[in-house]
Amino acid sequence: MSTIKCDIVTVERQVYSDEVDMVVAPGIMGTLGILPRHAPLITALQEGELRLKKGDEEEIFAVSGGYIEVRPDRVIIMADTAEHADEIDEARAEAARRRAEQLLKEKPPDIDRAAIEGALRRSRVRLKVARKRRRRARPQERIEE
């Protein structure tokens, strides 16, 4: 089976760079499945779960916004933010979710509702990705014990 080069970058850093079998990305028009020799395209990303499949392994990232450029031999993901599942602090993401929900309930007059709703969506994605990582780690932990 052939592979496709995948690069994930943000303004701050290069998050990932390797050959993969498949990329599953949260496009603004829905989920994109990208295999080697995919037709070229450029589209915007929305908050969501980005999955990279390589053999029997799967890497999961939380991304928010940005763009994806697909070429037949390369996928470049230019994300506003991108975090590997292992980098996410679940407690911090939960605290951010609670703060955003509280602000939306209180509705202070100077609130930027769109910004708070965006923060809430991002924290929910981060929690979903972190919890998937935790569920996948449990079977391995039992084997190692």
Image: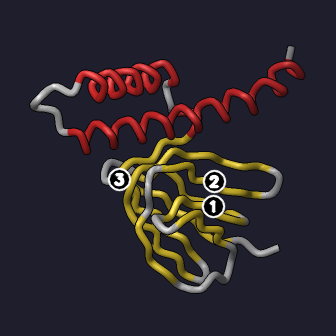
Q: Amino acid at mark 3?
A: Asp
The answer to whether marks 2 and 3 mark residues whose Cβ atoms lie closer than 8 Å is: no
Where 137 sits versus 25, above or below?
above
Q: Amino acid at mark 2?
A: Arg
Instruction: Give the Cα distance between marks 2 and 3.
Output: 17 Å
Question: Image check: 109 left or right of 138?
Answer: left
Instruction: Give the Cα distance between marks 1 and 3.
Output: 17 Å
Disc on the earlier residue, 2 or 3: 2
Where 133 sits versus 34, above or below?
above
**What quarter of the picture does the N terminus occupy?**
bottom right
Q: Which mark is residue 51?
A: 2
Q: Which mark is residue 35?
A: none
Residue found at x 16% / y 33%: 111
Residue that carries the numbered disc 1 in the rendered image: 24
Where residue 61 appears, x then y in whole percent?
55, 46
**What quarter of the picture does the C terminus occupy?**
top right
Say few, some or many: other residues with alpha carbon within 10 Å of mark 3 (under 14 / 14 to 19 / 20 or more).
Answer: some
Q: Nearer the viewer, residue 121 or 133?
A: 121
Image quadrant of residue 72? Answer: bottom right
| Residue furthest left in the image | 110
Residue that carries the numbered disc 3 in the rendered image: 80
Image quadrant of residue 96? Answer: top left
Where residue 92 appears, x then y in whole percent?
43, 21
| Residue furthest top in the image | 145
Disc on the earlier residue, 1 or 3: 1
Where residue 91 appears, x then y in whole percent?
48, 18
The answer to whether marks 1 and 3 mark residues whose Cβ atoms lie closer than 8 Å is: no
Q: Nearer the viewer, residue 27 or 53?
A: 27
The answer to whether marks 2 and 1 mark residues whose Cβ atoms lie closer than 8 Å is: yes
Q: Secondary structure at mark 2?
A: strand
Where 116 sits versus 61, above or below?
above
Q: Secondary structure at mark 3?
A: strand
